[in-house]
């Protein structure tokens, strides 16, 4: 094996770029790559003559060879080593940047949702709740596998709404750069634009057949996707104004108040409410989007003296969340419904600002 550090020092930026283009093109086509092919690639602003000279140098240095009498070149083991070392370094940096990006955006969105819940509670003088945006029958936009270590691959999945999730997958051994690239191409060509529900047995069988000896890795990725896209995975709910209940005599006796506050602290029944709201909305796409639960109509079974008014906000690409107001059955419905309608129309814009 060629020493990767030595190879990196020997290659200029231009040679490195040409070698990268040769290897990537060869991995995709399986055919020897000529200077004319490289010159036509996007981002390459070099003449065929210049590229030929650089390819001659790369051949002398042992990174590429000319098979038989072909005018094109293919990578040597040394060339593959250079490519893989660079690729792994790039992927490590991408994973680090992606983690930082997700953390930063998540913290920003948390603050926005907390502020929205507080605003609603203060405006209406009732109790508010809002769920973080989650995926609903979301479609896969991009999938990237990166080798983390000898026994693990990181699968990063980007979905509609530019939401990103990742999972670690156990593997038996390190994959070559060429095989990892081929798997990434297979996964993206086969799964781009599909929901988890649309990945059927025909798709799975075809992908495993094309993956050959790596069918077990494809099987693990396909098994991971539904788990990764699961709608109720870590549903975040923000609340505010629970103590507003004490302003209404019919709700403020010790037992009712204790039950009410416990419900908003534990949030389990709130999650059931949100799931019911989103299911009702999916079944009635032509509705106004405002739902009113009065007393025992609510999925929150231990608050028969309360009414709940909810609305969904939609960020597109199947990404949506729910906002709600909980108060006494004698609440000012006109005011509450007006507040939710106004906030619903503005929340998509607010959330887009939070994600930029």
Image (cartoon, rainbow, N blue to C red):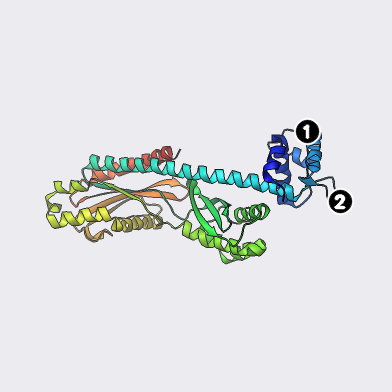
- Asked if marks 2 and 1 touch (Cβ < 8 Å), the reply is no
Which residue is disc 2 drawn over?
Answer: 68
Q: Nearer the viewer, mark 2 or mark 1?
A: 2
Q: x and y percent of residue 69 in the render?
A: 88, 49
Which of the labelled discs sits on residue 227, or is there none? Answer: none
Q: x and y percent of residue 167 in the render?
A: 50, 55
Give the total number of marks visible in the rendering.
2
Residue 294: quarter of image: bottom left
The span from disc 2 to disc 1 (Cα, nearest Å) is 25 Å
- Front position in the image: 241 or 297: 241
Which residue is disc 1 drawn over?
Answer: 47
Q: x and y percent of residue 199 in the render?
A: 55, 61
Q: In the visual, does 113 lie left or right of 243?
A: right
SS type, badge 1: loop
Q: Is residue 199 visible?
A: no
Q: Residue furthest right?
A: 69
Q: x and y percent of residue 172 in the render?
A: 59, 62
Q: In the visual, does 273 lie left or right of 55?
A: left
Query: Badge 2 local density, few (<14 within 10 Å), some, or many (20+)?
Result: few
Residue 89: quarter of image: top right
Rendered residue at 17%/55% (across/down): 258
SS type, badge 2: loop
Q: In the visual, does 328 lie left or right of 356?
A: left
Rendered residue at 85%/48% (across/down): 70
Q: In the visual, does 23 lie left or right of 326?
A: right
Q: Is residue 79 visible?
A: yes
Rendered residue at 14%/58% (across/down): 255
Precedes in sequence: disc 2 or disc 1 = 1
Query: Badge 1 local density, few (<14 within 10 Å), some, or many (20+)?
Result: few
């Amino acid at each position: 094996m060629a020493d990767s550090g030595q190879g990196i020092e020997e290659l200029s930026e231009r040679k490195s770029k040409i070698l990268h283009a040769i290897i990537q093109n060869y991995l995709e086509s399986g055919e020897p790559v000529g200077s004319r092919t490289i010159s036509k690639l996007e981002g390459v602003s070099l003449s065929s003559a210049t590229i030929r000279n650089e390819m001659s140098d790369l051949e002398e240095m042992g990174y590429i060879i000319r098979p038989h009498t072909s005018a094109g070149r293919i990578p040597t083991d040394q060339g593959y080593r250079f490519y893989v070392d660079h690729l792994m370094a790039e992927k490590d940096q991408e994973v680090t940047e992606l983690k930082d990006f997700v953390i930063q955006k998540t913290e920003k969105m948390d603050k926005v949702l907390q502020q929205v819940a507080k605003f609603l509670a203060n405006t209406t003088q009732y109790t508010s709740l809002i769920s973080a945006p989650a995926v609903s029958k979301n479609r896969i936009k991009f999938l990237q596998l990166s080798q983390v270590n000898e026994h693990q691959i990181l699968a990063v999945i980007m979905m509609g709404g530019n939401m990103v999730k990742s999972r670690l997958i156990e593997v038996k051994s390190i994959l070559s750069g060429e095989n990892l690239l081929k798997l990434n191409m297979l996964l993206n060509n086969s799964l781009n634009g599909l929901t988890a529900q649309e990945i059927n047995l025909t798709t799975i069988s075809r992908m495993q057949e094309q993956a050959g000896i790596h069918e077990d890795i494809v099987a693990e990725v396909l098994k991971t996707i539904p788990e990764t896209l699961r709608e109720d995975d870590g549903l975040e709910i923000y609340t505010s104004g629970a103590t507003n209940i004490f302003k209404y005599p019919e709700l403020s006796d010790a037992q009712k108040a204790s039950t009410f506050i416990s419900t908003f602290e534990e949030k389990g029944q709130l999650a059931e409410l949100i799931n019911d709201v989103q299911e009702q909305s999916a079944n009635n796409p032509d509705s106004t989007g405002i739902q009113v639960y009065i007393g025992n109509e609510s999925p929150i079974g231990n608050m028969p003296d309360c009414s709940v008014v909810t609305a969904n906000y939609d960020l597109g690409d199947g990404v949506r969340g729910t906002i709600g107001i909980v108060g006494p059955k004698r609440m000012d419905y006109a005011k509450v419904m007006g507040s939710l309608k106004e906030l619903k129309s503005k929340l998509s814009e607010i959330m887009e600002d939070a994600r930029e």
